[in-house]
Amino acid sequence: MDSIYFDKEPQIGINVYFPWGHHFFKNQAEFNQFLHIHYGNDAYQLVEITDENYNELLLKGVFHAI
């Protein structure tokens, strides 16, 4: 199951980090549509990037695919 990490930038969009790299979406609807098209019924886990978990995710290597 893929873990998909995201952070919302108000007035800008959504940064998303997939196992294969980074992608930017203009809004939640565009992000949801992408997930539906590319994952369909396949399981995935959404993880919001916050100030509290950023360093842990950095150490985990979440942002290395960029």
Image (cartoon, grey):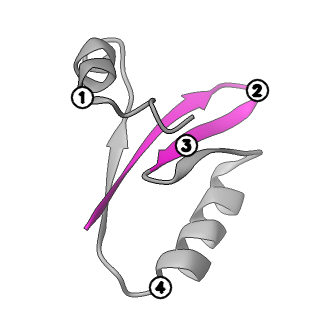
10 Å crowding of disc 4: few (<14), some (14-19), many (20+): few
Amino acid on which disc 3 is placed: Val
Amino acid on which disc 1 is placed: Lys
Amino acid on which disc 2 is placed: Gln
Lower sequence index among marks 1 and 4: 4
Give the labeled residue for mark 2.
11
Q: Secondary structure at mark 1?
A: helix
Lower sequence index among marks 2 and 3: 2
Q: Nearer the viewer, mark 1 or mark 2?
A: 1
Residue drawn 29% across and 75% down?
43
Residue drawn 25% across and 68% down?
1
Name the magenta segment's main secondary structure.
Answer: strand
Give the labeled residue for mark 3.
16
Give the labeled residue for mark 1.
60
Give the labeled residue for mark 4.
40
| Image coords of residue 56 (percent x, y) | 22, 19
Residue drawn 47% across and 85% down?
40
